[in-house]
Amino acid sequence: MPSENAHIRNFCIIAHIDHGKSTLADRLLEKTGTVNEREKQAQFLDNMELERERGITIKAQAVRMKYRANDGQDYVLNLIDTPGHVDFAYEVSRSLAACEGALLVVDATQGVEAQTLANVYMALEHDLEIIPVINKIDLPSADVERTKHEIEDVIGLDASIAVPVSAKEGLNIAELLETIVKVVPPPTGSKDEKLKALVFDSWYDNYRGVVMLIRVLEGTIALKQKIKLFSNAKEFEVQELGVINPFPTAVKQLIAGEVGVLVANVKELADAKVGDTVTDMLNPTTEPFPGFKEVKPMVFSGIFPVDAADYDNLRDALSKLRLNDSAFTWEPETSTALGFGFRCGYLGLLHMEIVQERLEREYNLNLITTAPSVVYKVFPIGKDPYFIDNPAKLPAVQHIEHLEEPYLTCHIHVPNDHLGNILKLCQERRGIQKGIDYIGTSGTRVRVTYEMPLAEVVFDFFDKMKSVSRGYASLDYEMAGYSTSELVKLDILINGEPVDALSVIVHKENSYHRGLEICQKLKDVIPKQMFEVAIQAAIGSRVIARTTVSAMRKNVLAKCYGGDISRKRKLLEKQKEGKRRMKQVGTVEIPQEAFLAVLKSEE
Amino acid sequence: MAGPVDPRTGLSAARFGVYVHFPFCLSKCPYCDFASIAAKTVPEVRYTDAVLRELELRLAVWPSVPPPVDSIFIGGGTPSLWSPPLVARLLERLASRLSLAQGVEVTLEANPGAADLERFAAYRAAGVTRLSMGVQSFTPSTLAALGRAHDGPTALRAFAAARAAGFDNVSMDFIYGVHGQTVAQVEADATQAAALGAEHLSAYALTLDRESLAEEVPLARQLRRGEVSLPVDDEVVRMQRVVREVYAASGLERYEVSNYARPGRHSRHNSLYWTGGDYLALGVGATGTLPLAEGRVRWSNHRSAEQYLAQVEAGALPQATHEVLTPLEQFEERVAMGLRLVSGVDLWALCRDFAQPTAEREKTVAMLVEHGLARELDGRLALTEAGFDVHSAVSARLM
């Protein structure tokens, strides 16, 4: 007798950004009858407004489909969608861990794209069975044979099982479903074992509290069961179990191999972290699912309300946001220039932008975000070392023995044609080359490994890497620990007053260049004031760069008589309103964007 | 000439004035945004009747007895096209339906091209006490650029005619910052104006930006299309400096951003606008501000003569807009207008009058003083010459 989970197939889709992942997912849902004509809406999987606008998936999703195969048997297919950005690499790895198979979508007109490689390798590390899906065969320029050849040559996958499809036209979707059933192995694990389930995503729901997406690896989870989370030993009772097909449907239990939704009266997202293991309270498993790691913010910036009266609203918004984004952290911060605000931590810059956008959009706040910083390790003279996430907190240079900054080991997959540009970029970003390996036998694909300061990677490296490789390079990284660096704090003075919120920590070699760059940037964004404004960059007491915003020359209404008073009052009110959107630092009015201007470097 | 003094600015200014608009012109000037109508024949009798009718309509909704009138200003348009007997009829009616204060200032705007001794004498006999002449420039190229029909000698003749008609209070308007104009030309205009010995001079920087004007003017369209270009700000500021110095050397002191006068000869009527005074307005496009039953009300009449006439003749108030000013708006206006005056304005008293907080403003004032943009003058806050150049920026920060 086959085991209970022999008819389950758990798989995900790996695809280059525009190779048709979402369209393919939609076809699978339609072909299996999971969504009907009426319910069809383009790109079913991305359901957050922001995700749809930005065309990226932030949260993982899991949809259950029923499928009667040609062998006459009914199968349950769970499609697990994965986040698609480098900021969310850990979430990707947990989603992959919930699967046994992966569809690798390759565009028949484009061939294998470097960006997909990093995810393919990650999938292979999780021992997933990979089915190449050659998409867009409806296009005249499609070359299925060449694409198969490339898959074998470049990735080293068996392309004999590759399924040519057109997701757009719905061609060959039936054959793909058959292949999934045949090739993706059923889950292992027994429903009678001790419960072991992987949390591969979690989010906060206003009505139900924390909702977890789980993959049951061993045993059975049932309603009312007392459960425990492995990492924090916190105990809960199962209140709700469900599957998404594609609307949430309640079930009484989930057994080994199944994927579903778990609600257990968990109040805070921090108690149900992605990667954690759920087990039975009374009869727990001895070993959690390996690979749990606390996702820690890597980038920090200050968030301040433009209007100090919004401080309490901002704090409320941050605590609400934190409920459904446990990777995001915040704590109060005081700036002499910007007043009371919060120091916030993010996974990366995209995450930071998303948080900022959500605060402004969902909570209607007018905010100033300061330039992001990584966490530095300070070794003060005669005292114990400590970490700082805010350049303003760096002590004076005479009190510092040395500084360390975090490094990443970065693996970049890139076609040979663009290798030179990538090496140059890594070199410019203070990278230390650790290796160059050719992949496959064609000699066209290269994997380069660099150790690079996080600070150099986190800002615009990803975008730069894409632009110098015309989109072909992909990045995958892990933390490599702290190393000593020649770092200095660059202070920015406005009319002689240091503005703490504008300080940045930079490498000594780049400091003059960066100082001038920041001064010029600020000169461009600070509007003319009623008097001249001097912008200076200084290291300690030494000024290394200066620009000047000249005073406004003429700003007066020539005539103002009885018939003009209302119109002219309104003009002045508008001017007053414009001033309100700026932050008064000393006597100078600085627009919001100035505080982020130090981030953008010019090429 | 004594008269009421506004306690917040220390300026002697009308507290209640009447503005009468005469919209008709012989031709339209390409920079002018006032309600004006170029007409070959002016329907002046019908218009006079309408204005007097409007006076009755306004009096009918007046909640109390109107105070004595300190000033009357007949502006335009080209009011010097208005026949003296009709102006006399207007002034007589105002005197009979309202009470005129002792020494009332009655100004009439005159176009130098449409003026002669006889006409001026008739206005004087009708009760006009002050003439304001739109000279703009004596320089042919500047007058041409401004599309003005008269020439320099005509303006000089008009001034002489005013004097001969017995006007001892004459003002002239000038414009600088005109396309193609040089600082030397501005200086020459200023020198000639000052030498005439007028009691009052106004010098305006040419303003064409859409937001500052009531309507888009033809010159602004030319500017937008790149057909003309105005002098850069630095140059315009230099022109203003030259004007101020030349006038001052002749005893005409600046008392407002764009206005200069011999001691005691500043415009009482215009001063009421800068000191929050009340004004009744009559005629096409005219704007009035009065304390009425619903609060401090500002209204504007229709800018089209047809609409205006049709409404009034049908017995309806001919107004196109109507707003009740909030205390904050009144405060903002008093601050911005008060700071236009060299005498300055008692900001803290205004904060008290309109219940506005002072803490932030105190910091701003300290900053302004530190940067030489403002100073304290007899307990008031007054802008310096440098401060006047950025009057809008300063006002926006104190409003």
Image: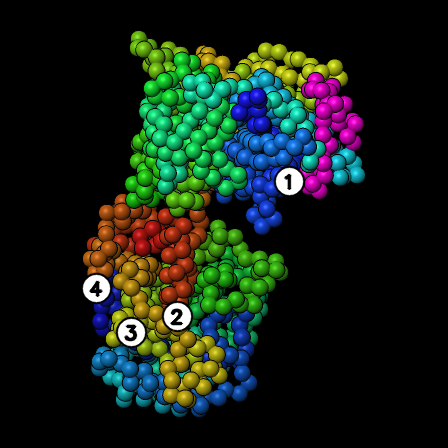
Residue identified by numbered label 1: A31
Q: CA distance from mark 2 to mark 4?
A: 23 Å
Which SS class for mark 4?
A: loop
Residue at screen point 49% across, 14% down: A480
Q: Amino acid at mark 4?
A: Pro
Marker disc for residue B7: 4
Between disc 3 and disc 4, the foreground one is: 3
> Is A312 rendered above or below residue B276?
above
| Span shown in magenta | A143-172
Asked if both marks, 4 and 1, belong to the same chain, the answer given is: no
Residue at screen point 57% across, 27% down: A8
Q: Are marks 2 and 1 in contact (CB under 8 Å)?
A: no
Q: Amino acid at mark 2?
A: Gly
Residue identified by numbered label 2: A563
Q: How is the image coloured?
A: rainbow
Which picture quadrant has residue A557?
bottom left
